[in-house]
Structure formats: C-alpha cells, structure tokens
Image: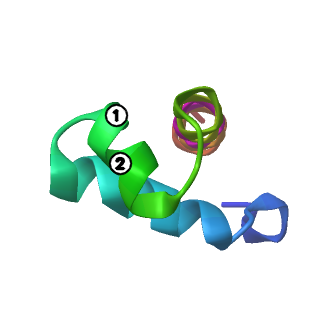
Amino acid sequence: MHFKQLDLKLLVVLDAPLAEGNLSAAARRTNLSKPATSAAVAWLREFSAMNYSA
C-alpha cells in the first residue's frame, strides 16, 4: 500500500459518513461542502481500489 500518497486528513472525512450514515450529515460534521465531501470519499475509494486490486 502506498501510504505516502494518502492525505491523513481524508481519514477524518472517511470516518464522518461511516458515523453519520450519509454524505450530507458528514459534510456538516466536517465543515466541508457536499461536493468536497463526495470528492474526498471518491478519492479514497479510488485509492483503495488501486491498492487492493493487485
């Protein structure tokens, strides 16, 4: 796994939807816009797919 590419602040964004259950509440919790929260989750999804598909 290439952790050097991972911004650790994204882990806070990952935790929010898991705890809140949806992106709107997660965006409020992290003080980010809905598009920014969605983009962060998408980036994490892509990161994990790149590192676990091998």
What kind of element bears circle 2? helix
- Residue identified by numbered label 1: 24
Q: At 34% across and 57% down in the image, what residue appears?
A: 16
Q: At 48% across and 68% down in the image, what residue appears?
A: 12
Q: At 53% across and 58% down in the image, what residue appears?
A: 31
Q: Which mark is residue 42?
A: none
What kind of element bears circle 1? helix
Q: The magenta stretch spans which residues?
A: 41-46
Q: At 60% across and 60% down in the image, what residue appears?
A: 10
Residue 42 included in the magenta stretch of the image: yes
Rendering quarter of residue 15: bottom left
Q: Quarter of the image for the C terminus: give it.
A: top right
Q: Look at label 1 and name its amino acid.
A: Ser
Asked if the residue under mark 2 is in contact with the one under mark 1, i.e. CB atoms within 8 Å, the reply is yes
- Residue identified by numbered label 2: 26
Q: Look at label 2 and name its amino acid.
A: Ala
Mark 1 Cα-neighbour bin, 10 Å: few <14, some 14–19, many ≥20: some
